[in-house]
Structure formats: structure tokens, C-alpha cells
Amino acid sequence: MTKLANLTLLTKLADQTIVMKADNRVGALEKRLKQDGFKGLVVSTDHLSELRSEYDRLLNEGGLDRDFYNEIVARYGLAWDFDPSTKLPAARSIIITAAQQPKMSMEFTYGAKKYYGIIPPTYVYDTDAAILRIISNLLHEKGYSINQALLPAKLLAVRSGLARYGRNNVTYIDGWGSYFRLRVYFSDMPCGEESWGEAAAMAQCRECTACVKKCPTKAISSERFLINAGRCLTFFNEGPDEFPEWIEPAWHNCLIGCMICQDVCPANKEYIRWLMPGGEFSEEETKLILDGVPQDRLPAQTTEKLSKVSMLDSYDLLQRNLRVLIENAGSGRQ
Ligand code: SF4
Ligand code: SF4
């Protein structure tokens, strides 16, 4: 073997060693998350420019309505940040995690009757801290850092192969349905070999239009894959304004968000009854919420119950959203 061939072989072996070491770290992280029932995948920050271009293209070609996008950015104070330089300048990888979550059912007493408000699986964020602790501990042991990333988590989950899109633009994980919450982090850990591909839809969607037929606002189309998010109930009941007149009161089905397209989805058939109690609110507490009593004047026990289901951040929406559910139940609309 010539010196040059030897050198090439050594370089290749050295490269392989780097990849293997990186793979070991990534493997350990994914394994550690799995031990606690979570899922996680690591991809390279090299994909950030591609993701940014994908979003720019959607906005420029009208696939994603720019006014709607701007409204979302203004409402939540969040814009995708595809540049990690301010958060973690040495970022080399993106960690995508998923935590299984049930629907929560909050029970309210009003006029001596019981009413129930559902919170969809993605809203309760108590698993975020557990996941962050696992990743931070493991990475810090190896001398790496982690930081929250403001990136499109659903798109990353789908492109990394962790999840698939449904026709309703909700993401699904094999064996978990859509009952999970995604999080995304930057890390300076190298990612080694990774899985990365085109955004893919669930195979079931080819033969199914259940969500198209059931969506009350006609936000889902069989003609195009992106839903019209500006017509989705979630957009309205997560926002502060009064509901527009074209939204029929009977369409409301959750305390926040909407579960109609997920409840009819065959990919969720094992989970639609996965409902956990999310706290009981007495007649007095229910009246305080319906009267719009400010959060800082609620009894401590009420605040605590709302906090357990991550509803304090959305407290200002509860008065309107709960009222419409109670009126629906009272009028027999649901
Ligand atoms: S209801 Fe059918 S079409 Fe809609 S996301 Fe589920 S499988 Fe796909
Ligand atoms: S969440 Fe509700 S309103 Fe939105 S697309 Fe699904 S069924 Fe339609």
C-alpha cells in the first residue's frame, strides 16, 4: 500500500472513529430518554438553512398565509429562529423529543350540574422539565451544552423520521398516535449518523378522509396537504378575540384547542379514550372563572389546580371558552 493510500485509510478510520463516538453519545441520549418513556432523535444543524428556505418558500408562494403567520408571531411573541448563534453559537445538533400525553378532563360545577372541559394532549407541559433534566445531565457529563430552540418542531419530527404528518397536519408517532408533545433543543454535541428525509404523511391518509369530512370549519382539504390554519378552531380559541359569527357554538369541543380531527382518526383508535382527570372545580371556583376574576385574585387552591394542567398561561381565555362549553351542554348542542 502506498503512503498516500495509507494516509487516506487512516483519515477514513479517524473520521469513522469520530462518527462512532458521536453515535455512542447520541445513542446513549436516545436510550436514556427511552428508559423514562420518552422518545428523542438528533439531527445536524446543517439542515437549518434548508428548513428556513422551506418556510420562506411556503410564505412567498402563499402555502402559508403571511398575515396568519404574522398574527401567530405577534400573539405568542415567537418567531422561528433558524440561527442558533445567539442561543448557542457552537450548536452542531438539534435534539427533538416527544413525551406521551393523555387528554385531560377538567370538571366544573355550575348551577349544581357537572360540566367537562377537555384539554388536548399537547397543552400540558409538565414533562418538559423532566426531559430537559435528562438531556442536560447527560450532556453536561460529556462537556456539552443545551439550549431551547425556537424551531418548527412538527416539521423537524417528520423530517427526522420521528413522526409522520396526518392530513390534518397533526403529527403522529407509530404506536403513540397523536397523543404526545414535541420539544426541540440546540446542542453543541456532534450528531454523527442521522436520519433525515422528505416530510412524509401517514400511509393511512391515502385511503382516508375522515378528518376532512368531520372538521366543522372545513379547514382540512383533500385537495392540498396544508390545512387552512386560519380557519381552525384552535386559532380562534387560543386567541383573545370574540369568536366570529360564522363559528357555530356547537363546534366547540375542548376548553382550548380542538380534538375533532384527532378523535375520528383511525391512527388514534387506541388512544381516544385516554382521558385523565385534570381537577375538579367547585361551583364557587367555576363562578370565579366565568366572572373573569383576575388570576391573582383566585384562591390558591384554584390557581394550583389550573397550574397542574398548565392552564394558568391560558387563564384569560378560560372565561370565554368555558362559557361556550357550558352553554352548549345546557342547550343540548353537545
Ligand atoms: S383521519 Fe384519516 S386522513 Fe385524517 S389524519 Fe387520520 S388517517 Fe389521515
Ligand atoms: S383541530 Fe378542529 S377545526 Fe382544526 S382542523 Fe382539526 S377538526 Fe378542524
Image: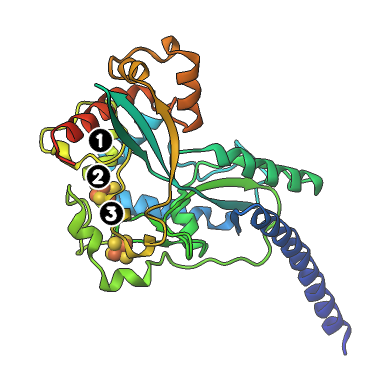
- In primary-sequence order, the first of circles 3 and 2 is 2
> Which label is found at residue 90?
none
Q: Label 1, label 3: how many angstroms apart (C-alpha)? A: 16 Å
Which quadrant of the frame does ligand 1 lie within?
A: bottom left
The residue carrying pointer 1 sits among few (fewer than 14), some (14 to 19) or many (20 or more) residues within 10 Å by Cα, namely some
Q: Position of residue 53 (x, y in %)?
A: 42, 54
Classify mark 2: helix, strand or loop.
loop
The residue carrying pointer 3 sits among few (fewer than 14), some (14 to 19) or many (20 or more) residues within 10 Å by Cα, namely many
Residue under pointer 2: 232
> Which label is found at residue 261?
3
Which residue type carries mark 1?
Phe
User: Do we see residue 106 in this rendering?
Assistant: yes
Compared to residue 304, the image places residue 161 above or below, namely below
Residue depicted at 57% across the width and 67% down the height:
195
Classify mark 1: helix, strand or loop.
helix
Q: Position of residue 310 (x, y in %)?
A: 47, 32
Residue depicted at 49% across the width and 57% down the height:
157
Which residue type carries mark 2?
Cys
> Which label is found at residue 236?
1
The residue carrying pointer 2 sits among few (fewer than 14), some (14 to 19) or many (20 or more) residues within 10 Å by Cα, namely some
Which residue type carries mark 3?
Cys
Look at the numbered disc 3 and say if its residue's Cβ is closer than 8 Å to ligand 2.
yes
Look at the numbered disc 2 and say if its residue's Cβ is closer than 8 Å to ligand 2.
yes
User: Do we see residue 61 in this rendering?
Assistant: no
Q: Residue furthest front?
A: 112
